[in-house]
Image (cartoon, rainbow, N blue to C red):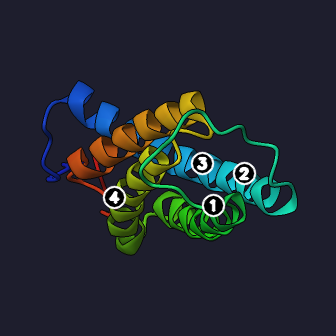
Amino acid sequence: MSQNTAPRRGGNAMAWATGGTLFAGVLMLVTGFLDIFQGIVGIAEDDVYTHIGDYVFKFDLTTWGWIHLILGVIIAVAGFGILKGAEWGRVAGIALASLNILFQFLFLPYQPWWALFSMAISIFVIWALATDEGYGASEKY
């Protein structure tokens, strides 16, 4: 009978963090693909998004399309890295989720509800990736 020597923070907390990391990876993939589609729409049709009021941080919607397209591809790649258990995926996931919060804040006048929802998802991703201490270890339990 082999005895496991991996540190445990408590069965429930460790399972929650591990499940949260897996869910964060899936959310990064989904957010990346949705940003890709959002970018394609912004590039193809400038009049799809309505502009609500005047805003300090104004960009052309084609520019926003390219920003979302590029960011979406990078976020999806990081999500794949998280699901594969790569340490670079975790670090990139935290950095890209932070960057996504910033860009979604700047995109608020065009898609306010989606921007707020995407910011909330990014906050969860940062929390899940920052709290999982056993990330990338071959034996977590």
Of labels 3 and 1, the one closer to you: 1
Distance from the alpha carbon under mark 3 to that under mark 4 = 14 Å
Q: In this view, does 77 lie above or below 32?
A: below
**First reached walking from the N terminus: tag 4 or tag 1:** 1
Q: Which residue is drawn at the image coordinates 79% and 63% (left, top)?
A: 43
Circle 1 crowding by C-alpha within 10 Å: few under 14, some 14–19, many from 20: many
Circle 4 crowding by C-alpha within 10 Å: few under 14, some 14–19, many from 20: many
Labelled disc at residue 104: none
Q: Mark 4 points at which residue?
A: 94
Q: Is residue 133 above or below residue 89?
A: above
Distance from the alpha carbon under mark 2 to that under mark 3 = 10 Å
Q: Which residue is drawn at the image coordinates 34% and 55% (left, top)?
A: 98
Question: Is 9 situated left or right of 32 in this image?
Answer: left
Q: Nearer the viewer, residue 96 or 41?
A: 41
Q: Which residue is drawn at the image coordinates 32% and 43% (left, top)?
A: 128
Q: In this view, does 15 lie above or below 87?
A: above
**First reached walking from the N terminus: tag 3 or tag 4:** 3
**Disc 3, SS:** helix
Labelled disc at residue 64: 1
Labelled disc at residue 31: 3
Callout 4 touching callout 1 (CB < 8 Å): no
Residue 81: x percent and y percent? 50, 67
Distance from the alpha carbon under mark 2 to that under mark 4 = 21 Å
Circle 3 crowding by C-alpha within 10 Å: few under 14, some 14–19, many from 20: many
Distance from the alpha carbon under mark 4 to that under mark 1 = 22 Å
Question: Is 115 situated left or right of 60 in this image?
Answer: left
Q: Name the residue under label 2.
A: 38
Q: What residue type is labelled 2?
A: Gln
